[in-house]
Amino acid sequence: MEFLSPGRLWFLLLIPVFVALYLFMQHRRSQYALRFTNIALLDRVAPRRPQWRRHVAVGMALLAACACIVAFAQPKDEVKVPRERATIVVSIDVSLSMMATDVEPNRLEAVKVAAKRFVNQLPTKFNIALVSFAGTASTVVPPTTDRATVLRSIDALELAESTATGEAIFTSLQALTQVPPDPEHPNEPAPARIVLMSDGKRTVGRTAQEGARAAKEKNTPIFTVAFGTDSGFIEMDGFRQRVPPDRADLRSVAEITGGQAYTAESAGEIQDVYENIGSSIGFDTVDKEVTARYAGFAMLLTLAAAGAAVALASRFP
């Protein structure tokens, strides 16, 4: 942790002075009591009360003073703040392999749940587009800040044949051309990211690497998620067909574009992946003054010390 006014931390040296003074006063009080008090009579008339309560009250007061001094020194810390404006294209594979049940209840339903939570955690000023792909790719929802429309469209996704991973990237790039201009900076393109979710190998259309190179030219990183397990399978015409994810293909897409590649084999893991992606593309880490945090600690400790003092002053039967 760093401070904007570190010189003010010298006031913390007063704390051990007060501690030493308090211990000295406690020692003098105990010596005076032993010298001039009839202990046997005092025990019968006014039984001793636990001394730890008084110590706790003083300790909390000193901690409150420490928190006040730290706040006075204007501490700063790294905090996450939402980015003001960006566009995220969520591209979801809806090929038939997504009906595999190696992830409960099936891959597609698990992805829908995770994708909706991902959309809800992004900053409200972000534009979000939804692309679905199987044998072809299409823009289901163009870039918008209308979260409700995106969420309903995710729920409505349906399965189809084949997997056109490369076409999904090209369609996602096309969707980005529909981003509304920034009123304050109409000539500046908004920062954009593509989140590409797939569980199978490309079977039709242009290659994923072709799409990745096009995305790199437009300075658009792609975050890929290879979803499912190697043991996943679907039933087709009475035959069992294995549908393992193509992790290497998706990893190369992320590497080409400067994004990140993830893998997920369960609903819990895919949710963790989406949270990591949301944290990396939706927020910036900046140095920010956090004086209020320590002022709040000081207030709570002061109230606790005051409560302890009131309790000590009260006489309960």
Image: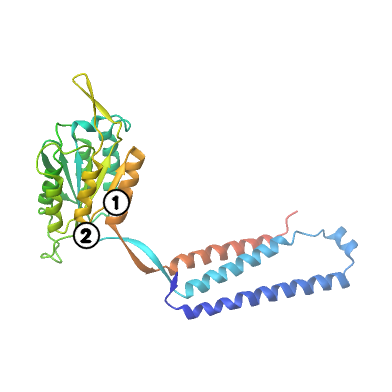
Residue type at tag 1: Ile
- Residue 272, given in percent of the width and then of the height, sits at 35, 46
Residue type at tag 2: Arg
Quarter of the image where one finds residue 85: bottom left
Q: Quadrant of the N terminus?
A: bottom left
- Residue 116, given in percent of the width and then of the height, sits at 27, 43
Looking at marks 1 and 2 on the same chain, the residue that comes earlier in the sequence is marked by: 2
- Which numbered marker is on residue 12? none
Which residue corresponds to mark 1?
A: 277
Disc 2 element = loop
Give the total of numbered labels. Answer: 2
Which residue corresponds to mark 2?
A: 85
**Left or right of 268, for residue 244:** left
- Residue 136, given in percent of the width and then of the height, sits at 10, 38
Eye-nearest disc, 1 or 2: 1
Above-or-below relation of 111 to 50: above
What residue is drawn where x is 44% and y is 78%? 5
**Left or right of 58, for residue 163:** left
**Residue 313 seen in render:** no
Query: In terms of depth relative to the viewer, which is nearer, 70 or 247?
Result: 247
Quarter of the image where one finds residue 32: bottom right
- Residue 196, given in percent of the width and then of the height, sits at 21, 46
